[in-house]
Image (tube, helix red, strand yellow):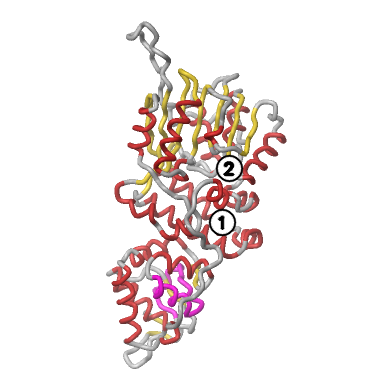
Amino acid sequence: MTHSGGTVTGTETPGAAHRIAAFVERAVAAPLEFDIRAWDGSTAGNGSGATLVLRTPRAVRRMLWRPGQLGAARAFVAGDCDIEGDLVAVVRQLGSVLGTPWPDLAGAALQGLRNGPGREILGPPVARPSAEVRRYRGARAVRHHYDVGDEFYRLVLGPSMVYSCAYWPDGERSGYGPTEAQRAKLDMVCRKLDLRPGMRLLDLGCGWGSLLLHAARHYGVEGVGVTLARNQARLAARRIEEAGLADRVRVRLQDYRAVRDGPFDAVASIEMTHHLSRSGRREHAAALARLVAPGGRVLSHELCVLPGGRKLMRSPFLLRYPHPDLDLGTVGRSAMLAERHGLELLDVENLREHFVPTIRSWLTNLERNRERATALVGYQTVAVWRLFFAVGLLSFEAGLAGVQHLLFTRPRPAGRHVFAARPSRYRRPPAGDPPTGTPT
Protein backbone atom coordinates (compact mmCIF):
# COMPACT_ATOMS: atom_id res chain seq x y z
CA MET A 1 0.00 0.00 0.00
CA THR A 2 1.23 3.48 -0.77
CA HIS A 3 0.05 6.99 0.00
CA SER A 4 0.89 10.32 -1.59
CA GLY A 5 4.15 10.47 0.30
CA GLY A 6 5.38 6.95 -0.45
CA THR A 7 5.21 3.61 1.36
CA VAL A 8 3.74 3.50 4.83
CA THR A 9 6.32 2.34 7.35
CA GLY A 10 5.74 0.91 10.79
CA THR A 11 6.41 4.29 12.44
CA GLU A 12 4.06 6.34 10.29
CA THR A 13 0.40 6.90 11.07
CA PRO A 14 -1.66 5.31 8.33
CA GLY A 15 -4.13 7.59 6.58
CA ALA A 16 -7.84 6.93 6.22
CA ALA A 17 -7.32 5.39 2.77
CA HIS A 18 -4.90 2.79 4.15
CA ARG A 19 -7.15 1.81 7.04
CA ILE A 20 -10.14 1.40 4.73
CA ALA A 21 -8.09 -0.52 2.16
CA ALA A 22 -6.89 -2.90 4.86
CA PHE A 23 -10.46 -3.42 6.04
CA VAL A 24 -11.66 -4.23 2.48
CA GLU A 25 -8.82 -6.70 1.93
CA ARG A 26 -9.60 -8.49 5.20
CA ALA A 27 -13.30 -8.62 4.35
CA VAL A 28 -12.84 -10.13 0.87
CA ALA A 29 -9.67 -12.11 1.68
CA ALA A 30 -8.07 -10.84 -1.52
CA PRO A 31 -5.83 -7.98 -2.63
CA LEU A 32 -7.47 -4.65 -3.35
CA GLU A 33 -8.33 -4.38 -7.06
CA PHE A 34 -8.89 -0.62 -7.10
CA ASP A 35 -7.41 2.51 -5.56
CA ILE A 36 -8.77 4.54 -2.66
CA ARG A 37 -8.38 8.28 -2.18
CA ALA A 38 -9.64 9.71 1.12
CA TRP A 39 -10.63 13.13 2.44
CA ASP A 40 -7.34 13.50 4.35
CA GLY A 41 -5.29 13.31 1.13
CA SER A 42 -4.09 9.75 1.69
CA THR A 43 -4.19 7.22 -1.14
CA ALA A 44 -3.90 3.45 -1.25
CA GLY A 45 -3.89 0.87 -4.01
CA ASN A 46 -1.78 -0.26 -6.93
CA GLY A 47 -2.57 2.32 -9.61
CA SER A 48 -5.30 0.26 -11.29
CA GLY A 49 -7.01 3.32 -12.78
CA ALA A 50 -10.27 2.69 -10.91
CA THR A 51 -10.54 4.81 -7.77
CA LEU A 52 -12.99 4.95 -4.88
CA VAL A 53 -12.98 8.58 -3.77
CA LEU A 54 -14.10 9.20 -0.18
CA ARG A 55 -14.79 12.92 -0.20
CA THR A 56 -15.84 13.34 3.43
CA PRO A 57 -15.91 11.27 6.65
CA ARG A 58 -19.71 11.13 6.20
CA ALA A 59 -19.20 8.40 3.59
CA VAL A 60 -17.91 6.00 6.23
CA ARG A 61 -20.33 7.27 8.87
CA ARG A 62 -23.29 6.38 6.65
CA MET A 63 -21.95 2.85 6.25
CA LEU A 64 -21.46 2.47 10.00
CA TRP A 65 -25.01 3.54 10.76
CA ARG A 66 -26.43 1.31 8.01
CA PRO A 67 -23.85 -1.37 7.22
CA GLY A 68 -24.30 -3.11 3.91
CA GLN A 69 -25.69 -2.10 0.56
CA LEU A 70 -28.01 0.71 1.66
CA GLY A 71 -25.42 2.69 3.61
CA ALA A 72 -22.95 2.51 0.73
CA ALA A 73 -25.67 3.51 -1.75
CA ARG A 74 -26.63 6.51 0.37
CA ALA A 75 -23.02 7.68 0.49
CA PHE A 76 -22.69 7.35 -3.29
CA VAL A 77 -26.01 9.01 -4.14
CA ALA A 78 -25.42 11.88 -1.70
CA GLY A 79 -22.00 12.56 -3.20
CA ASP A 80 -20.03 11.75 -0.05
CA CYS A 81 -18.10 9.28 -2.18
CA ASP A 82 -17.62 8.72 -5.90
CA ILE A 83 -15.96 6.26 -8.25
CA GLU A 84 -13.55 7.44 -10.92
CA GLY A 85 -12.57 5.21 -13.82
CA ASP A 86 -14.05 1.72 -14.06
CA LEU A 87 -17.23 1.91 -11.98
CA VAL A 88 -18.08 -1.77 -12.52
CA ALA A 89 -14.66 -2.99 -11.34
CA VAL A 90 -15.02 -1.16 -8.01
CA VAL A 91 -18.63 -2.25 -7.45
CA ARG A 92 -17.69 -5.85 -8.28
CA GLN A 93 -15.23 -6.12 -5.37
CA LEU A 94 -17.13 -3.88 -2.96
CA GLY A 95 -20.19 -6.07 -3.50
CA SER A 96 -18.40 -8.89 -1.71
CA VAL A 97 -17.82 -6.64 1.31
CA LEU A 98 -21.41 -5.36 1.34
CA GLY A 99 -22.70 -8.92 1.31
CA THR A 100 -21.20 -9.52 4.76
CA PRO A 101 -23.85 -9.75 7.55
CA TRP A 102 -24.47 -6.37 9.17
CA PRO A 103 -23.23 -7.20 12.70
CA ASP A 104 -19.98 -8.67 11.35
CA LEU A 105 -19.43 -5.73 9.01
CA ALA A 106 -20.08 -3.08 11.66
CA GLY A 107 -18.02 -4.91 14.27
CA ALA A 108 -15.04 -5.24 11.94
CA ALA A 109 -15.23 -1.57 10.99
CA LEU A 110 -15.38 -0.39 14.61
CA GLN A 111 -12.49 -2.67 15.54
CA GLY A 112 -10.46 -1.02 12.79
CA LEU A 113 -11.22 2.40 14.27
CA ARG A 114 -9.87 1.37 17.66
CA ASN A 115 -6.55 0.52 16.06
CA GLY A 116 -5.89 4.02 14.77
CA PRO A 117 -7.16 7.56 14.43
CA GLY A 118 -10.54 7.95 12.79
CA ARG A 119 -12.69 9.67 15.35
CA GLU A 120 -13.81 12.12 12.64
CA ILE A 121 -16.05 9.49 11.09
CA LEU A 122 -18.00 8.95 14.30
CA GLY A 123 -21.09 11.00 14.99
CA PRO A 124 -24.87 11.04 14.66
CA PRO A 125 -26.61 9.53 11.61
CA VAL A 126 -26.68 11.61 8.43
CA ALA A 127 -29.93 12.55 6.70
CA ARG A 128 -30.96 10.32 3.82
CA PRO A 129 -30.50 11.59 0.25
CA SER A 130 -33.61 13.26 -1.17
CA ALA A 131 -33.66 10.71 -4.01
CA GLU A 132 -34.55 7.89 -1.60
CA VAL A 133 -38.17 6.73 -1.64
CA ARG A 134 -40.31 4.16 0.14
CA ARG A 135 -41.55 1.05 -1.59
CA TYR A 136 -44.82 1.46 -3.51
CA ARG A 137 -46.54 0.01 -6.56
CA GLY A 138 -48.79 0.93 -9.47
CA ALA A 139 -48.67 3.96 -11.73
CA ARG A 140 -46.71 6.00 -9.18
CA ALA A 141 -43.84 3.51 -9.18
CA VAL A 142 -43.83 3.27 -12.98
CA ARG A 143 -43.68 7.05 -13.33
CA HIS A 144 -40.93 7.26 -10.72
CA HIS A 145 -38.76 5.07 -12.97
CA TYR A 146 -39.75 6.17 -16.48
CA ASP A 147 -40.67 9.84 -16.15
CA VAL A 148 -37.11 10.87 -15.31
CA GLY A 149 -37.03 12.83 -18.57
CA ASP A 150 -37.02 12.00 -22.25
CA GLU A 151 -33.75 13.83 -22.90
CA PHE A 152 -32.07 11.90 -20.10
CA TYR A 153 -33.21 8.61 -21.62
CA ARG A 154 -32.09 9.76 -25.07
CA LEU A 155 -28.57 10.32 -23.69
CA VAL A 156 -28.56 6.84 -22.15
CA LEU A 157 -30.37 4.77 -24.78
CA GLY A 158 -29.17 6.46 -27.93
CA PRO A 159 -31.28 6.92 -31.09
CA SER A 160 -33.12 3.58 -30.72
CA MET A 161 -35.00 4.77 -27.59
CA VAL A 162 -35.45 1.10 -26.63
CA TYR A 163 -35.16 0.40 -22.92
CA SER A 164 -34.94 -3.39 -22.90
CA CYS A 165 -32.45 -6.14 -23.68
CA ALA A 166 -30.92 -5.87 -27.16
CA TYR A 167 -29.96 -8.84 -29.34
CA TRP A 168 -26.58 -9.66 -30.85
CA PRO A 169 -27.15 -12.60 -33.28
CA ASP A 170 -23.54 -13.79 -32.97
CA GLY A 171 -22.78 -12.32 -29.57
CA GLU A 172 -20.63 -9.23 -29.19
CA ARG A 173 -18.47 -10.51 -32.08
CA SER A 174 -21.27 -9.70 -34.54
CA GLY A 175 -19.93 -6.18 -35.05
CA TYR A 176 -23.28 -4.65 -34.13
CA GLY A 177 -23.45 -1.47 -32.14
CA PRO A 178 -26.25 -0.89 -29.60
CA THR A 179 -28.54 0.67 -32.22
CA GLU A 180 -28.17 -2.27 -34.61
CA ALA A 181 -28.58 -4.76 -31.76
CA GLN A 182 -31.80 -3.09 -30.63
CA ARG A 183 -33.11 -3.12 -34.21
CA ALA A 184 -32.25 -6.85 -34.40
CA LYS A 185 -34.25 -7.40 -31.17
CA LEU A 186 -37.29 -5.53 -32.52
CA ASP A 187 -37.10 -7.52 -35.73
CA MET A 188 -36.81 -10.82 -33.87
CA VAL A 189 -39.91 -9.96 -31.82
CA CYS A 190 -41.86 -9.20 -35.02
CA ARG A 191 -40.78 -12.45 -36.66
CA LYS A 192 -41.58 -14.55 -33.60
CA LEU A 193 -45.05 -12.99 -33.58
CA ASP A 194 -45.33 -13.79 -37.31
CA LEU A 195 -46.54 -10.29 -38.11
CA ARG A 196 -48.12 -9.74 -41.52
CA PRO A 197 -49.60 -6.69 -43.29
CA GLY A 198 -53.01 -5.76 -41.94
CA MET A 199 -52.61 -7.53 -38.57
CA ARG A 200 -53.37 -5.73 -35.31
CA LEU A 201 -50.58 -5.62 -32.70
CA LEU A 202 -50.98 -4.69 -29.03
CA ASP A 203 -47.83 -3.58 -27.17
CA LEU A 204 -48.20 -3.65 -23.36
CA GLY A 205 -45.81 -1.26 -21.65
CA CYS A 206 -44.88 0.18 -25.03
CA GLY A 207 -42.16 2.59 -23.91
CA TRP A 208 -41.49 5.30 -26.45
CA GLY A 209 -43.19 3.36 -29.25
CA SER A 210 -40.13 1.84 -30.94
CA LEU A 211 -41.65 -1.63 -31.44
CA LEU A 212 -44.86 -0.17 -32.86
CA LEU A 213 -42.90 2.03 -35.27
CA HIS A 214 -40.73 -0.88 -36.42
CA ALA A 215 -43.68 -3.23 -36.87
CA ALA A 216 -45.70 -0.66 -38.82
CA ARG A 217 -42.80 0.36 -41.08
CA HIS A 218 -41.44 -3.07 -41.90
CA TYR A 219 -44.36 -5.45 -41.38
CA GLY A 220 -47.36 -3.34 -42.37
CA VAL A 221 -49.32 -3.83 -39.14
CA GLU A 222 -51.72 -1.59 -37.29
CA GLY A 223 -50.97 -1.20 -33.62
CA VAL A 224 -51.92 0.07 -30.18
CA GLY A 225 -49.49 0.68 -27.35
CA VAL A 226 -50.32 1.33 -23.70
CA THR A 227 -48.15 2.79 -20.95
CA LEU A 228 -48.61 4.36 -17.51
CA ALA A 229 -45.73 6.83 -17.97
CA ARG A 230 -46.88 10.24 -19.19
CA ASN A 231 -43.52 11.21 -20.70
CA GLN A 232 -43.39 7.99 -22.69
CA ALA A 233 -46.93 8.38 -24.04
CA ARG A 234 -46.30 11.99 -25.06
CA LEU A 235 -43.00 11.33 -26.84
CA ALA A 236 -44.26 8.11 -28.48
CA ALA A 237 -47.23 9.99 -29.94
CA ARG A 238 -44.90 12.66 -31.31
CA ARG A 239 -42.57 10.08 -32.87
CA ILE A 240 -45.53 8.33 -34.50
CA GLU A 241 -46.82 11.63 -35.87
CA GLU A 242 -43.40 12.57 -37.23
CA ALA A 243 -43.12 9.16 -38.92
CA GLY A 244 -46.44 9.69 -40.71
CA LEU A 245 -47.95 6.60 -39.07
CA ALA A 246 -50.65 8.19 -36.91
CA ASP A 247 -53.36 6.59 -39.05
CA ARG A 248 -52.02 3.10 -38.27
CA VAL A 249 -50.56 3.10 -34.77
CA ARG A 250 -51.29 5.00 -31.58
CA VAL A 251 -50.22 5.07 -27.94
CA ARG A 252 -52.55 5.47 -25.00
CA LEU A 253 -51.89 6.46 -21.38
CA GLN A 254 -53.75 3.47 -20.01
CA ASP A 255 -53.50 0.49 -17.66
CA TYR A 256 -53.23 -2.68 -19.73
CA ARG A 257 -56.05 -4.26 -17.70
CA ALA A 258 -58.41 -1.59 -19.02
CA VAL A 259 -57.85 -2.44 -22.71
CA ARG A 260 -61.22 -3.41 -24.18
CA ASP A 261 -60.74 -3.14 -27.96
CA GLY A 262 -59.33 -6.64 -28.46
CA PRO A 263 -58.80 -9.28 -29.45
CA PHE A 264 -55.58 -8.55 -31.33
CA ASP A 265 -53.76 -10.76 -33.80
CA ALA A 266 -50.56 -10.48 -31.75
CA VAL A 267 -49.64 -9.18 -28.29
CA ALA A 268 -46.17 -8.13 -27.06
CA SER A 269 -45.25 -7.53 -23.43
CA ILE A 270 -41.64 -6.32 -23.26
CA GLU A 271 -39.97 -6.16 -19.84
CA MET A 272 -42.96 -5.07 -17.79
CA THR A 273 -43.65 -8.07 -15.53
CA HIS A 274 -40.96 -7.06 -12.99
CA HIS A 275 -43.26 -4.16 -12.05
CA LEU A 276 -45.99 -6.62 -11.05
CA SER A 277 -46.66 -8.37 -7.75
CA ARG A 278 -47.33 -12.09 -7.55
CA SER A 279 -51.07 -11.50 -7.96
CA GLY A 280 -50.33 -8.91 -10.64
CA ARG A 281 -48.53 -11.54 -12.70
CA ARG A 282 -51.65 -13.71 -12.56
CA GLU A 283 -53.67 -10.77 -13.90
CA HIS A 284 -51.05 -10.24 -16.58
CA ALA A 285 -51.33 -13.84 -17.79
CA ALA A 286 -55.13 -13.59 -17.85
CA ALA A 287 -54.96 -10.36 -19.85
CA LEU A 288 -52.59 -11.88 -22.40
CA ALA A 289 -55.02 -14.75 -23.00
CA ARG A 290 -58.03 -12.41 -23.16
CA LEU A 291 -56.47 -9.90 -25.54
CA VAL A 292 -55.10 -12.24 -28.23
CA ALA A 293 -57.34 -13.77 -30.89
CA PRO A 294 -57.57 -17.56 -31.34
CA GLY A 295 -54.59 -18.62 -33.42
CA GLY A 296 -52.71 -15.44 -32.49
CA ARG A 297 -49.35 -15.22 -30.76
CA VAL A 298 -48.12 -13.61 -27.55
CA LEU A 299 -44.51 -12.76 -26.76
CA SER A 300 -43.69 -12.01 -23.13
CA HIS A 301 -40.12 -10.68 -22.75
CA GLU A 302 -39.47 -10.97 -19.01
CA LEU A 303 -36.77 -10.29 -16.44
CA CYS A 304 -36.65 -13.35 -14.17
CA VAL A 305 -34.89 -14.19 -10.95
CA LEU A 306 -32.59 -17.21 -11.05
CA PRO A 307 -31.93 -19.60 -8.12
CA GLY A 308 -28.90 -17.70 -6.82
CA GLY A 309 -30.58 -14.29 -7.02
CA ARG A 310 -33.40 -14.43 -4.48
CA LYS A 311 -31.83 -11.61 -2.47
CA LEU A 312 -31.95 -9.42 -5.57
CA MET A 313 -35.69 -8.96 -5.11
CA ARG A 314 -35.05 -7.56 -1.62
CA SER A 315 -32.16 -5.30 -2.55
CA PRO A 316 -32.57 -2.16 -0.38
CA PHE A 317 -30.80 -0.01 -2.98
CA LEU A 318 -33.03 -1.13 -5.87
CA LEU A 319 -36.25 -0.82 -3.85
CA ARG A 320 -35.41 2.57 -2.29
CA TYR A 321 -34.03 4.27 -5.40
CA PRO A 322 -34.63 3.18 -9.02
CA HIS A 323 -37.28 0.43 -8.63
CA PRO A 324 -39.69 0.78 -5.68
CA ASP A 325 -41.93 -1.92 -7.21
CA LEU A 326 -39.26 -4.42 -8.29
CA ASP A 327 -40.48 -8.01 -7.99
CA LEU A 328 -38.92 -10.57 -10.31
CA GLY A 329 -40.81 -13.76 -11.04
CA THR A 330 -39.49 -17.04 -12.43
CA VAL A 331 -39.73 -18.34 -15.96
CA GLY A 332 -41.39 -21.54 -14.76
CA ARG A 333 -44.18 -19.72 -12.96
CA SER A 334 -44.76 -17.41 -15.93
CA ALA A 335 -45.19 -20.38 -18.26
CA MET A 336 -47.49 -22.14 -15.77
CA LEU A 337 -49.74 -19.07 -15.32
CA ALA A 338 -50.07 -18.59 -19.08
CA GLU A 339 -50.99 -22.23 -19.60
CA ARG A 340 -53.57 -22.07 -16.80
CA HIS A 341 -55.30 -19.29 -18.74
CA GLY A 342 -55.42 -21.25 -21.96
CA LEU A 343 -52.22 -20.27 -23.78
CA GLU A 344 -49.89 -22.83 -25.33
CA LEU A 345 -46.14 -22.37 -24.91
CA LEU A 346 -44.32 -22.46 -28.26
CA ASP A 347 -40.79 -21.40 -27.40
CA VAL A 348 -38.52 -20.14 -24.61
CA GLU A 349 -35.25 -18.37 -25.37
CA ASN A 350 -32.72 -17.21 -22.80
CA LEU A 351 -31.26 -13.76 -23.58
CA ARG A 352 -29.32 -13.24 -20.33
CA GLU A 353 -25.92 -12.97 -21.98
CA HIS A 354 -27.29 -10.35 -24.38
CA PHE A 355 -28.30 -8.10 -21.48
CA VAL A 356 -24.73 -7.68 -20.22
CA PRO A 357 -23.51 -5.77 -23.32
CA THR A 358 -26.85 -3.95 -23.44
CA ILE A 359 -26.47 -2.53 -19.94
CA ARG A 360 -22.78 -1.87 -20.55
CA SER A 361 -23.68 0.31 -23.55
CA TRP A 362 -26.18 2.29 -21.43
CA LEU A 363 -23.60 2.82 -18.68
CA THR A 364 -20.99 3.89 -21.23
CA ASN A 365 -23.40 6.44 -22.67
CA LEU A 366 -24.23 7.79 -19.22
CA GLU A 367 -20.58 8.08 -18.18
CA ARG A 368 -19.72 9.81 -21.45
CA ASN A 369 -22.61 12.28 -21.07
CA ARG A 370 -22.57 12.59 -17.28
CA GLU A 371 -22.15 16.37 -17.21
CA ARG A 372 -25.09 16.90 -19.56
CA ALA A 373 -27.22 14.35 -17.68
CA THR A 374 -26.49 16.06 -14.37
CA ALA A 375 -27.62 19.39 -15.82
CA LEU A 376 -30.87 17.73 -16.91
CA VAL A 377 -31.88 15.70 -13.85
CA GLY A 378 -29.47 16.56 -11.02
CA TYR A 379 -26.50 14.89 -9.36
CA GLN A 380 -28.41 12.40 -7.19
CA THR A 381 -30.50 10.99 -10.04
CA VAL A 382 -27.42 10.47 -12.20
CA ALA A 383 -25.66 8.76 -9.28
CA VAL A 384 -28.65 6.44 -8.79
CA TRP A 385 -28.60 5.38 -12.43
CA ARG A 386 -24.83 4.91 -12.56
CA LEU A 387 -25.04 2.56 -9.58
CA PHE A 388 -28.21 0.90 -10.94
CA PHE A 389 -26.53 0.03 -14.23
CA ALA A 390 -23.38 -1.26 -12.52
CA VAL A 391 -25.36 -3.49 -10.13
CA GLY A 392 -27.62 -4.67 -12.96
CA LEU A 393 -24.73 -5.54 -15.26
CA LEU A 394 -23.01 -7.57 -12.53
CA SER A 395 -26.26 -9.31 -11.53
CA PHE A 396 -26.94 -10.57 -15.06
CA GLU A 397 -23.29 -11.40 -15.64
CA ALA A 398 -23.24 -13.49 -12.45
CA GLY A 399 -26.43 -15.35 -13.32
CA LEU A 400 -28.49 -13.90 -10.47
CA ALA A 401 -31.17 -12.72 -12.91
CA GLY A 402 -32.12 -13.65 -16.45
CA VAL A 403 -34.03 -12.43 -19.50
CA GLN A 404 -36.47 -14.81 -21.17
CA HIS A 405 -38.50 -14.71 -24.36
CA LEU A 406 -41.66 -16.76 -23.78
CA LEU A 407 -43.71 -17.23 -26.95
CA PHE A 408 -47.30 -18.46 -26.67
CA THR A 409 -50.24 -19.04 -28.93
CA ARG A 410 -53.92 -19.12 -28.13
CA PRO A 411 -55.19 -22.40 -29.60
CA ARG A 412 -58.22 -22.31 -31.86
CA PRO A 413 -61.35 -23.92 -30.41
CA ALA A 414 -61.51 -27.66 -30.99
CA GLY A 415 -65.16 -27.63 -32.03
CA ARG A 416 -66.87 -30.93 -32.69
CA HIS A 417 -63.72 -32.57 -34.06
CA VAL A 418 -61.66 -32.97 -30.91
CA PHE A 419 -58.71 -34.61 -32.66
CA ALA A 420 -58.55 -32.25 -35.65
CA ALA A 421 -54.96 -31.18 -36.42
CA ARG A 422 -54.06 -27.65 -35.28
CA PRO A 423 -50.37 -27.11 -36.14
CA SER A 424 -48.69 -23.98 -34.82
CA ARG A 425 -46.25 -23.81 -37.77
CA TYR A 426 -43.77 -22.06 -35.51
CA ARG A 427 -40.08 -22.15 -36.30
CA ARG A 428 -37.64 -20.03 -34.34
CA PRO A 429 -36.26 -17.31 -36.68
CA PRO A 430 -32.64 -18.09 -37.63
CA ALA A 431 -30.30 -15.98 -35.50
CA GLY A 432 -28.09 -15.07 -38.44
CA ASP A 433 -30.80 -13.49 -40.59
CA PRO A 434 -30.16 -9.79 -41.18
CA PRO A 435 -32.73 -7.46 -39.59
CA THR A 436 -35.53 -6.36 -41.89
CA GLY A 437 -35.59 -2.84 -43.29
CA THR A 438 -33.46 0.13 -42.37
CA PRO A 439 -32.60 1.47 -38.91
CA THR A 440 -35.44 3.38 -37.29
Name the foreground residue: 250 vs 401.
Answer: 250
Decide which of tag 2 and tag 1 comes sooner along the chain: 2
Relative to 63, does residue 303 appear above or below in the rendering? above
Q: Report if residue 166 lies within the magenta region.
A: no
Which residue is the extreme one toward the bottom? 11
Q: Which amino acid, by three-letter code, is at mark 2?
A: Leu
Q: Quadrant of the N terminus?
A: bottom left
The residue at the point 58 percent across, 36 percent down is: 226
Relative to 39, does residue 29 appear above or below in the rendering? above
Q: Which residue is mark 2?
A: 228
Q: Report if residue 50 lies within the magenta region.
A: yes
Name the foreground residue: 439 vs 83.
Answer: 83
Q: Which residue is mark 1?
A: 366
Residue 96 in picture, x, y percent from top left: 33, 64
Q: Which amino acid, by three-letter code, is at mark 1?
A: Leu
Q: Which residues are magenta?
A: 43-66
Q: Quadrant of residue 105?
A: bottom left
Relative to 365, does residue 422 appear above or below in the rendering? above
Q: Quadrant of the C terminus?
A: top right
Q: Is 107 situated left or right of 39 in this image?
A: left
Residue 259 in picture, x, y percent from top left: 56, 31
Q: Quadrant of residue 264?
A: top right
